[in-house]
Amino acid sequence: MPSLTIENYVKTVYQTCVRQGNSPAGTGQIATALGVSPGTVTSMLKTLNESGLAEYTPYEGVRLTESGRNLALRVLRRHRLIELFLAQTLELSWDEVHEEAENMEHAVSDHLIDRIEKFLGYPTTDPHGDPIPRADGTIEITQNRSLAEAAAGERFRLARVLDQTPEFLRYLSESGLLLGVEGEVAANRREAGVVTVKIDGVDTTVSRDVAEKLLIGM
């Protein structure tokens, strides 16, 4: 059975590669994400390479093998279903569930996760809009645009939040930008670096940096 450390590494490598169009994840990126030194990362990447979970090339980066990808998706499946379970059954807020799921994702069995999935009605996304991997190892990723790309007058629904730090999520909650909320882009002022949206008749202005972390659908 893979250790907690190995599971955290393959999950981080997978998420990093997906964010950048499946190009290799750099040692520095992984070190930053996990809060460890680059030297520690290099040592672990060599271990993942030797165990067949990843293909690591010094100075170029790392990609997961099929085995590594399957393991990463199993961990993400556990994490995201636990988040949703905590939100729906214990009514934890979306800024509380991530840390709790981090603590629990390595301790629960796949059998229990399957039961949680069935109990929740086979959901497709977690409280932040991230896709939930299926039991067969597949995952459906919707290509949503960021709010920063939307034009004035365009209707939108907030479908996914990329920055899931508690502080950022609380800021969104205070601004009325909750997952699933619908509204209209009142203005997209690229020269000023801000986007203004109208939700339930109320205008809210956010920076383009914030808008780029909000994925929309409609």
Image (cartoon, rainbow, N blue to C red):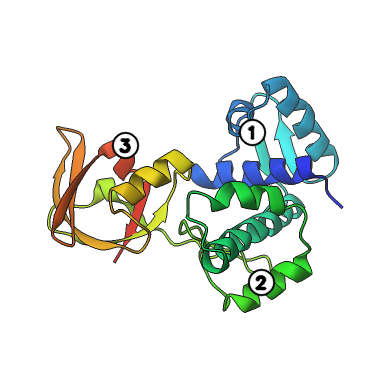
Residue under label 3, please give it. Answer: 209
Q: Provide residue 71's location: percent of width, then percent of height.
A: 74, 54
Residue at point 58% right, 28% down? 32
Instruction: Tell me the amino acid under the disc marked 2.
Output: Ile
* Residue 166 in view, yes or no: yes
Quadrant of res 134: bottom right
Residue under label 1, please give it. Answer: 34
Q: CA distance from mark 3 to mark 1?
A: 23 Å
> Regarding mark 3 in the picture, which secondary structure is present there?
helix
Q: Vertical placement of 172 versus 179: above or below?
A: above
Residue under label 2, please give it. Answer: 116
Residue at point 56% right, 68% down? 89
Q: Earlier in the sequence, mark 3 or mark 1?
A: 1
Q: CA distance from mark 2 to mark 3?
A: 35 Å
> Badge 3: how crowded within 10 Å, few (<14), some, or many (20+)?
few
Instruction: Tell me the amino acid under the disc marked 1.
Output: Leu
Quadrant of res 27: top right
Q: Vertical placement of 209 versus 104: above or below?
A: above
